[in-house]
Image: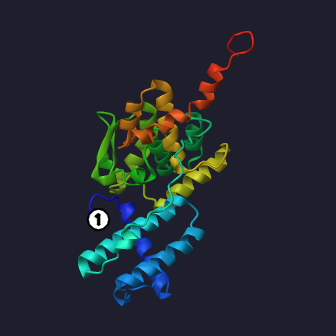
Amino acid sequence: MKGKAPNTLRGYRADCRDFLAWHGGGTIDTVKWEEVQLDGNEFEFRAAEYLSVRKKTDGSISTFRRRITSLKAFATYLRKAHGIHVDDLLEFRGPKPPKAEAHPLREGWAGVFRLIGRAKSNQERALVALAGLCGARVSEARECKVAHVDLEARLIFLGGKHGHYRKVPLSRVAMLHILPALIDAKQDGRDCLIEMCDTTARETVKRLAREAGLVGDPASHDLRMTFGTEIYNKTKDLRLVQELLGHEDPKTTAIYTESQMPSMRAAVEIDEEGTLE
């Protein structure tokens, strides 16, 4: 599938293997594609049954919607490669996702620095700095290569989603926390600054958040949202935030204005004598 990020494709493959394993009564690790026999009608029936089961077991709407997309992609492959028509499945629509909300760290950038202070390695510090001080997604931080960091120009190239990269200026403090991992990678002959799988990277952020005593249960994406929120608070420029975060749709960036509601509400409060509270 052209234009899809590697992590997206891995998710699609895992979903299809999960469906085929469920259909055949095996496990996701032992299923063999060539041994699965499906005609169009049976595929549609079993896919609908499978989705009904997973709708009850999946922990989030986004996971369930991804499964639908995965099976649609598989159905398209069956039609093109084997002439098996499953048109009803292609018309299937999943539940609408809830309205996106920004969940920045309540401590803001101060929380990001507390995480960095708890980091146990240069790679952990770089992971937090890339997400919280540069706005990188976890996948972007993990795929950030030595060649993507331009120290002379103080720029970092982030992205890879749909094959697009964006230039993000490096603050001096971000450079300070990324540079040790960059030096380590060069000395070790590694291409990437961070050698962690996706799960390890996300669990690392959650562990650091617990150790730092941050409010709530922050996740890795909250660091990126903290970066976006802090930049918006500083500039009030949504277009700038969109560029820095690499959002294709400005509606995605607009959620960062929602994080301003508490301060906006406080700003308009007036007491009975007509003075601002």
Quadrant in which residue 16 is drawn: bottom left
Q: Is residue 29 visible?
A: no
Left or right: 277 as drawn, with respect to 61: right
Element on which disc 1 rests: loop
Which one is in front, 166 or 78?
78
Q: Is residue 201 visible?
A: yes
User: Residue 192 at x, y = what percent?
Assistant: 36, 54
Quadrant in which residue 101 is drawn: top right
Left or right: 150 as drawn, with respect to 126: left
User: Residue 120 at x, y = what percent?
Assistant: 56, 50
Under mark 1, the amino acid is: Met
Q: Residue furthest right?
A: 272
Instruction: Write the residue at 37% across / 90% down.
Output: 35
User: Residue 213 at x, y = what percent?
Assistant: 68, 44
Q: Quadrant of the N terminus?
A: bottom left
Which one is in front, 139 or 28?
28
Quadrant in which residue 36 is drawn: bottom left
With respect to residue 210, does 156 lie above or below? above
- What residue does disc 1 label? 1
